[in-house]
Amino acid sequence: TLAQHVYNDPKIDNAKFDTKAWVCVSDHFHVLTVTKTILEAISDRKDDSGNLEMVHKKLKQNLLGKKFLLVLDDVWNQRRDEWEAVQTPLTYGAIGSRILVTTRDEKVASNMQSKVHRLKQLREDECWNVFAKHTSIDDNLELNNELKKIGRRIVEKCK
């Protein structure tokens, strides 16, 4: 959620990125698949190549000298060598390019060799505010107490 707010923040538009892309990285990580997904997100074109070298070349061409923002969301792969293979064509972007990685695994974050921001758990009242906002519970004054109790139990379980 925080990454989405950053990605969609108007200040990001003022940062004058030539391109922005959001890529969901599954736990079934494969270098070619992830690299193709990044290429497709940046170029807005499907790529049917099965050759990693060709995909790297196309991605490099699409990024060469361009300032980009890339979000790699929900990363689980811990293998540094695979990440280095994915990152190779990303090094051709312009100065000021950024890659934002979201993960729940601290080892993934350290393998990315980047600045780590640990998000703390929300307090229960903050969780309730988020829950209530997204379910419109607080907007409905006539909502019965039973539904509020259920909502509070959900918030308590989800933390």
Image (cartoon, rainbow, N blue to C red):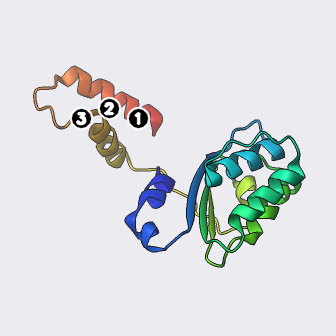
Q: Secondary structure at mark 1?
A: helix
Marks 3 and 2 close (CB-CB < 8 Å):
no
Residue situated in front as seen by the camera: 102 or 120: 102
Identify whether 68 is placed above or below 106. Answer: below
Marks 2 and 1 close (CB-CB < 8 Å):
yes
Neighbour class for label 3 at 10 Å: few (<14), some, many (≥20)? few
Which residue is drawn at the image coordinates 11% and 32% (left, top)? 141
Q: Is residue 73 left or right of residue 153?
A: right
Question: Residue tagged by mark 3?
Answer: 136
* Amino acid on which the number 1 mark rests in the picture: Glu
Question: Residue tagged by mark 2?
Answer: 152
Residue situated in front as seen by the camera: 50 or 78: 50
- The furthest residue to the bottom: 95
Q: Secondary structure at mark 3?
A: loop
Which residue is drawn at the image coordinates 36% and 28% (left, top)? 153
Residue 134: name its quadrant.
Answer: top left
Residue situated in front as seen by the camera: 61 or 154: 61
Q: Name the spot of residue 70 as percent of width and height, x first.
A: 61, 59
